[in-house]
Image (cartoon, rainbow, N blue to C red):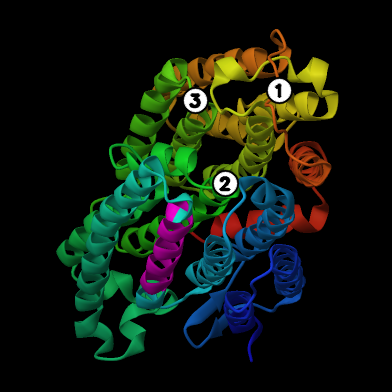
């Protein structure tokens, strides 16, 4: 079996095994084992020669995203070992959580590795349905409402993406005829200049709106704060760190096809417009949030907007900023959600007013969460500072008019996040819950949090030469 398909089917095989598990601890350990084995396979992609293998395609753009996905998958599985025990799921909900998690991981890998745009759509749809199940697993009215909002809004978006995929196939059909080549990203990009530009433009509009819904871009973002606030704590790290990347990756692939035709309307300005709207709305919305998980969900919208701006500008440097930003955001935001999730269990609430003084009462958690929030705010020396600095310098050189809205958005968002940092970590201590989580939950949460901080620091200040070369090559792929 090709390595790319093994990365899809191993998690799905694990899901079948987990469906038969009734006991909590063995199921959680099996979930970790499957995630660890998947990560080992994903690391094999670093030595993969690349190219097409049937419906999949391996290149420098998707390899770092796939490896990152399985890194976060493993740390989330480890975090879940303690967090799910604290949530006290019944056996049915426990199995539903673990099964949906591994189904999601397999679909995430397929969405990133698919060369066939139709297969990519199917993978994103499977990931969406798995996300809906995980968000709804608590069964409370707010969780059901959040799951329905995720299902309806993203269902509409994914339907629009399907229509865009069909239109893209129709654009290619006069050139390549019937068959899989009409949906192959590699083939379409090479032959896009011979397709009808009007049909390509129409396809991109639907693909951008459809997958943009999944990426949380404004004005298609309404599902994201509810889903991240009401689902199990671990799902927040998965939604922000993985699902948004897969959707934005699909948009970038579509943009590369459309931009390859000199007669189409340039797709970059559309991405920049959606990105600016996301950045500015989210930056100001951060000041009105009282729920910690909702606040950082809005921060995810902000950072997806920044990545969209980078890819919309195009060129090797801006694309590198966008790719580095996706990687940095996934690591830093999942670290924040690990910290916030454990703090919410310790305090018995996820309201910002109920979580305070963590650096005093629980120094390892408080200072780790403070550093993670600082990293998400774009402060040095973490990866997001490097990507934002790169984006600003490239904007100053290519599109000086972007400096003002970018600067306003970045400063307002950073100030809002620093305010949250002060309230959560450096404020007056608040009382703990009457029934705090077990020590296992603290160890798994802190281990995952600090590991992600270390990786984000490495991306910001000590990027290995091999990884730097891989990211530089990946930045060349979208054009």
Task: Report the Cα–Cα distance between label 3 and label 2.
Answer: 24 Å
Residue 379, by quadrant, is top right
Q: Secondary structure at mark 1?
A: loop
First-in-chain label (1 vs 3): 3
Q: Which mark is residue 397?
A: none
Report the residue that reaches farthest toward the top.
428
In the rendered view, tell whether residue 279 sits above or below residue 148. above
Q: What is the magenta segment's predominant secondary structure? A: helix
> Could you say which is closer to the camera, residue 28 or residue 186?
28
Q: Residue at x 76, y 46 (%)?
A: 448
Contact, CB < 8 Å: mark 1 with mark 3?
no
Q: Which residue is mark 1?
A: 432
Q: Which mark is residue 291?
A: 3
In the rendered view, tell whether residue 232 sits above or below residue 375. below
Contact, CB < 8 Å: mark 3 with mark 2?
no
Crowd band around label 3 with a 10 angstrom C-alpha radius: few (<14), some (14–19), many (20+): some
Q: Secondary structure at mark 3?
A: loop
Residue 72 is one of the magenta-drawn residues: no
Q: Which residues make up the magenta segment?
A: 120-136
């Amino acid at each position: 079996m090709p390595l790319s398909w093994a990365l899809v089917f191993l998690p799905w095989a694990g899901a079948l095994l987990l469906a038969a598990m009734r006991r909590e601890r063995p199921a959680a350990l099996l979930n970790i084992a499957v995630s660890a084995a998947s990560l080992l396979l994903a690391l094999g992609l670093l030595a993969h020669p690349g190219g097409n293998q049937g419906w999949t395609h391996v290149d420098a753009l998707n390899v770092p995203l796939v490896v990152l996905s399985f890194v976060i998958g493993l740390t989330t599985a480890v975090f879940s070992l303690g967090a799910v025990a604290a949530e006290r799921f019944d056996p049915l909900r426990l199995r539903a959580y673990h099964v949906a998690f591994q189904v999601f991981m397999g679909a995430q890998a397929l969405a990133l590795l698919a060369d066939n745009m139709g297969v990519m759509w199917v993978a994103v749809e499977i990931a969406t349905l798995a996300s809906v199940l995980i968000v709804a697993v608590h069964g409370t009215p707010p969780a059901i409402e959040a799951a329905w909002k995720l299902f309806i809004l993203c269902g509409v978006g994914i339907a629009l993406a399907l229509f865009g995929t069909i239109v893209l196939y129709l654009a290619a059909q006069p050139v390549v005829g019937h068959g899989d080549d009409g949906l192959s990203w590699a083939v379409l990009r090479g032959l896009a200049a011979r397709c009808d530009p009007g049909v390509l433009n129409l396809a991109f509009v639907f693909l951008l709106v459809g997958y943009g819904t999944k990426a949380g871009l404004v004005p298609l973002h309404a599902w994201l704060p509810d889903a991240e606030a009401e689902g199990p704590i671990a799902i927040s790290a998965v939604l922000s760190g993985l699902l948004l990347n897969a959707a934005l990756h699909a948009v970038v692939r579509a943009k590369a096809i459309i931009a390859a035709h000199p007669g189409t309307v340039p797709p970059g300005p559309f991405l920049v417009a959606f990105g600016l709207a996301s950045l500015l709305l989210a930056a100001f919305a951060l000041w009105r949030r009282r729920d910690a998980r909702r606040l950082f969900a809005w921060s995810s919208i902000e950072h997806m907007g920044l990545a969209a701006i980078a890819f919309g500008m195009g060129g090797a440097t801006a694309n590198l900023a966008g790719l580095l930003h996706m990687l940095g955001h996934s690591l830093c935001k999942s670290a924040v959600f690990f910290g916030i999730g454990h703090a919410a269990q310790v305090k018995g609430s996820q309201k910002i007013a109920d979580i305070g003084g963590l650096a005093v009462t629980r120094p390892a958690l408080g200072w780790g969460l403070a550093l993670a929030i600082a990293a998400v705010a774009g402060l040095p020396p973490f990866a997001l500072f490097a990507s934002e600095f790169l984006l600003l310098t490239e904007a100053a050189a290519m599109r000086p008019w972007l400096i003002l809205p970018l600067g306003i958005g970045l400063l307002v968002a950073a100030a809002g996040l620093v305010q949250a940092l002060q309230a959560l970590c450096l404020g007056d201590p608040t009382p703990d819950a009457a029934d705090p989580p077990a020590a296992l939950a603290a160890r798994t949460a802190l281990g995952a949090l600090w590991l992600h901080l270390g990786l984000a620091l490495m991306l910001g200040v000590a990027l290995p030469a091999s990884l730097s070369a891989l990211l530089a090559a990946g930045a060349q792929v979208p054009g």
